[in-house]
Image (spheres, rainbow, N blue to C red):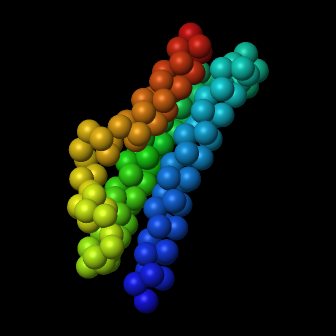
Amino acid sequence: MKSTLVSILQQRMDKCTTEMFWAVAAITGFCAFIVTQKSSLLNAMPCWILIAGIVIIVFYGTFYILHRHASYYLDAQDLVSLIRDFPECPKRMKREPAPWGLRSFIGSAFYILWVVGAGIVSISTLF
């Protein structure tokens, strides 16, 4: 039973990481589209609509990255509680992960900076 739960939790953790990666890729693609199609988009709609869209996407992307980060570490904490009793399990795997520590958050911070940077670049090209 425990081995099944460990496998499920690991799959969920992998899913969080993959979803975070693809969210960043989609937002990057959206911002790249705005940068490359700027003149066509500005002919079709006012600039403020594009800026509002970019801002909404960047804020939602940031929220989504933080949500996936938190979900990953909730699953990691559950995983630690399951494997803590196994004597053959290494000590470092038995430690409770700190989701908001510097080492834990550095990857998510990179993704957030990437999304915000893409938003800033795409907004700046509209002017």
Name the quadrant of the C terminus.
top right
The front one of 30 and 77 is 77
64 lies above or below 43:
below
Indicate the position of residue 14 as horizontal and vertical percent values.
Answer: 51, 59
Residue 54, x across and y down, in percent: 53, 31
| View extreme (right): residue | 40
Residue with the most extreme bottom position: 1
Tell me where residue 116 sits by quadrant.
top left
**Total number of numbered labels?**
0
> In the displayed structure, would residue 7 be above or below residue 66?
below
Image position of 87 (left or right of 22): left
* Residue at x 50% of width, y 52% of height: 17
**Does the image show residue 68?**
yes
Q: Is residue 77 visible?
A: no
Position of residue 96 measured from the top left corner of the image (x, y, whole percent): 23, 61
Could you tell whether 78 is left or right of 23 in the image? left
Residue 87 position by quadrant? bottom left
User: Which residue is the extreme one toward the front?
Assistant: 88
> What residue is rendered at 43% in x and 54% in y?
68
- Residue name at image x 55 percent, y 40 percent: 24
How far across and how far down the image is residue 113, in percent? Answer: 42, 29
29 versus 40 height, above or below: below
Q: Is 81 placed left or right of 109 in the picture?
A: left
Considering depth in this image, is 78 or 22 the residue closer to the camera? 78
Q: Quadrant of the N terminus?
A: bottom left
Q: Residue at x 59, y 15 (%)?
A: 126
